[in-house]
Image (tube, grey):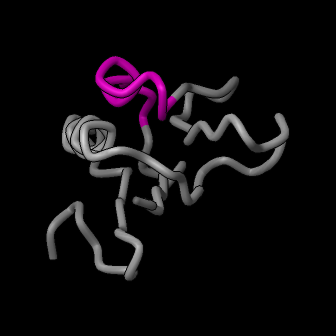
Amino acid sequence: MKLRIVVDPDLCIGAASCVTIAPETFQLNVENKAEVLDHGVQEGEPSYERTIECTESEKDAIILGAQSCPTLAITIFDEAGAQLYPEV
């Protein structure tokens, strides 16, 4: 399955809870802002928004990571474009 993950760098305060819960998906950059990892993308490319392939268990971890963000800086969409988190 594919998920589109969007991090709003203006809302991110670098709490790193997303990194703790889903380190295979999130990392903090040099500005202490969360970024979305994609091992198929060249380093240095924009990483606040990416569409990634994931398994069901990875999806669960990614959503838990987003839910752990104290500022709701992470938004997750499914393949059809429906917003999974935060729920609308």
Horizontal and vertical percent position of residue 87: 15, 68
Q: How many numbered markers are drawn?
A: 0
> In which quadrant will I find the N terminus?
bottom left
Horizontal and vertical percent position of residue 49: 58, 57
Residue under the image location 55 percent in, 42 percent down:
36
Q: Residue 66 sits in which quadrant?
A: top left
**In this rendering, would 64 be left or right of 75?**
left
Q: Identify which residue, 22 or 67, lies in the foreground.
A: 22
17 drawn magenta: yes
**In this rendering, would 52 be left or right of 70?**
right
**In this rendering, would 36 be left or right of 18?**
right
Q: Residue furthest top?
A: 20
Horizontal and vertical percent position of residue 54: 42, 46
Q: Residue 13 sits in which quadrant?
A: top left
- The image shows residue 82, relative to residue 47, as above or below, that is below
Q: Identify which residue, 75 or 55, lies in the foreground.
A: 55
- The image shows residue 22, relative to residue 38, as above or below, that is above
Residue under the image location 69 percent in, 23 percent down:
30
Horizontal and vertical percent position of residue 20: 34, 17
Residue under the image location 45 percent in, 28 percent down:
14
Q: Identify which residue, 2 or 21, lies in the foreground.
A: 2
Magenta extent? 13-26
38 drawn magenta: no
**In this rendering, would 81 be left or right of 7?**
left
Residue under the image location 65 percent in, 29 percent down:
31
> In which quadrant will I find the C terminus?
bottom left
Q: Residue furthest left?
A: 87
